[in-house]
Image: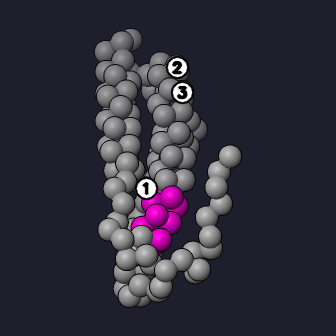
Amino acid sequence: MFASKPPLRSVGSDPDYRFTLANERTFLAWLRTGLALLAGAVALASLVHDFGPRPFRIVITGLLLVLSLVVTAGAYVRWDRAERAMREKRPLPTDPLPRIIVSGAAIIIVAAAVLVYLAEFGR
């Protein structure tokens, strides 16, 4: 189903180590973002039991978990694609991950605003 890629070390030539380290730092930043989303989901699910309607909390928790998984998995795909492009001296590929995180965050913000509204005025 998926074509296997050759090992990274066998592709092209080693780029300047500074570019590889910068790519790694970007990867780690995306991982931190994924972990922060996971922490938000865990906090919402386990610490805030009486804030707003339960179904809204469950939906927001689910959205946070899904976004966390997408960002974490996407971080590796993004790192691999960038590293291969640098090794092959190609332009860096465009990446959908920033658009995904912005869209997901916007949806979660709207859902959280509804939750806050319902918690304060829906009683």
In the image, is residue 25 above or below residue 2? below
Q: Say which label, 1 or 3, has the lower sequence index.
A: 1
The structure residue drawn at horizontal position 49% and vertical position 53%, both measured from the top left corner, is 74
Tag in front: 1 or 3? 1
Q: Mark 2 Cα within 10 Å, few/some/many (few <14, many 20+)? A: few
CA–CA distance in space, label 1 to label 3: 21 Å
| Image x and y of residue 48, in percent | 50, 34
Characterize the local packing of mark 1: few (<14), some (14-19) or many (20 or more) Cα atoms within 10 angstroms.
some
Residue 92 seen:
yes
Real-space Cα distance between discs 2 and 1?
25 Å
Using the image, determine if residue 73 lies above or below residue 120: below
Measured in 3D between alpha carbons, the distance from the residue under mark 3 to the one under mark 2, in whole angstroms, is 5 Å
The one of 50 and 70 positioned closer to us in this rendering: 70
Q: Callout 3: 10 Å neighbours few (<14), some, many (20+)?
A: some
Q: Taking 52 as reference, is 38 above or below it?
A: below
Residue 33's disc is 1
Could you tell me which residue is drawn at 47 percent across and 22 percent down? 56
Q: Quadrant of residue 65?
A: top right
Position in image of residue 80 (x %, y %) = 50, 66
Magenta segment boundaries in residue numbering:
75-84
Q: Position of residue 44 (x, y in %)?
A: 50, 37
Residue projecting furthest to the top: 123
Disc 2 is placed on an element classified as helix
- Check residue 58 in the rendering and tell me which mark sits there, or answer none: 3
Q: Residue at x 45, y 60 (%)?
A: 78
The answer to whether the residues at label 3 and label 2 have Cβ atoms under 8 Å apart is yes
User: Tag 1: residue type?
Assistant: Thr
Task: Give SS at disc 3.
Answer: helix
At label 2, which amino acid type do we have? Pro
Check whether the beta carbons of the residues at disc 1 and disc 3 lie within 8 A of each other: no
Q: Nearer the viewer, residue 71 or 35?
A: 71
* Residue identifier under label 2: 55
